[in-house]
Image (cartoon, rainbow, N blue to C red):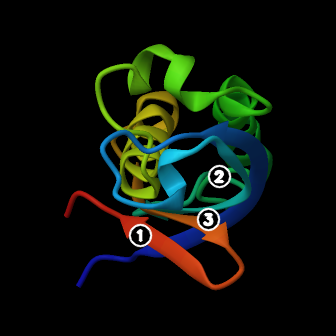
Amino acid sequence: MPAKYTLKIVTDFASAHTLRDYPGACSRLHGHNWKVEAEVVATELNEIGMAIDFKEIKKAAREIAAELDHYYLNDLKPFQKINPTAENIARYFYQQLAQKINNDTITVSRLTLWETERACVTYSED
């Protein structure tokens, strides 16, 4: 069985949204302090014994978070046609992070987005 290393980083951002066609209070403008947990799987280590520097994962995740931080998500291009639900935000974040760091030996494996301290969604493509 081949080696597998799973690395995880955590970052956050704050943003507001409204859920279109939602039959409740979330159809009104409200905000969240989102927490993002990104897991990356590596199959090899480099010459100094690292899969990928945590700094690289954090930098990429923070860049994506900065694009969402303190914005009204409904105004941003990715969420003008799809609802900015936790599920859709998690998928968006996962796919953006994968574009930035995936290579032959490193793959984003799952992204967990916490909407509150008690509610989260995990997105993966395996």
How many angstroms separate mark 2 from mark 1 (CA)? 32 Å
Q: Position of residue 96 (x, y in %)?
A: 46, 32
Classify 10 Å Cα crowding around label 3: few (below 14), some (14-19), many (20 and above): some
Residue at horizontal 54 percent and vertical 17 percent from the top = 75
Mark 1 is on which residue type?
Thr
Mark 3 is on which residue type?
Glu
Left or right: 40 as drawn, with respect to 48: left
Disc 3 element = strand
Q: Quadrant of residue 103?
A: top left
How many angstroms separate mark 2 from mark 3 (CA)? 38 Å
**Residue pointed to by mark 1:** 122
Disc 2 element = loop
Position of residue 123 relative to residue 88, above or below, is below
How many angstroms separate mark 1 from mark 3 (CA)? 11 Å
Of the image marks 2 and 3, the number of the one nearer the N terminus: 2
Mark 2 is on which residue type?
Glu
Classify 10 Å Cα crowding around label 1: few (below 14), some (14-19), many (20 and above): some
**Residue pointed to by mark 2:** 47
Tag 1 near tag 3, CB within 8 Å? no
Q: Position of residue 74 (x, y in %)?
A: 51, 26
Residue at horizontal 43 percent and vertical 45 percent from the top = 19
Left or right: 80 as drawn, with respect to 52: left
Residue at horizontal 52 percent and vertical 55 percent from the top = 26
Of the image marks 2 and 1, the number of the one nearer the N terminus: 2
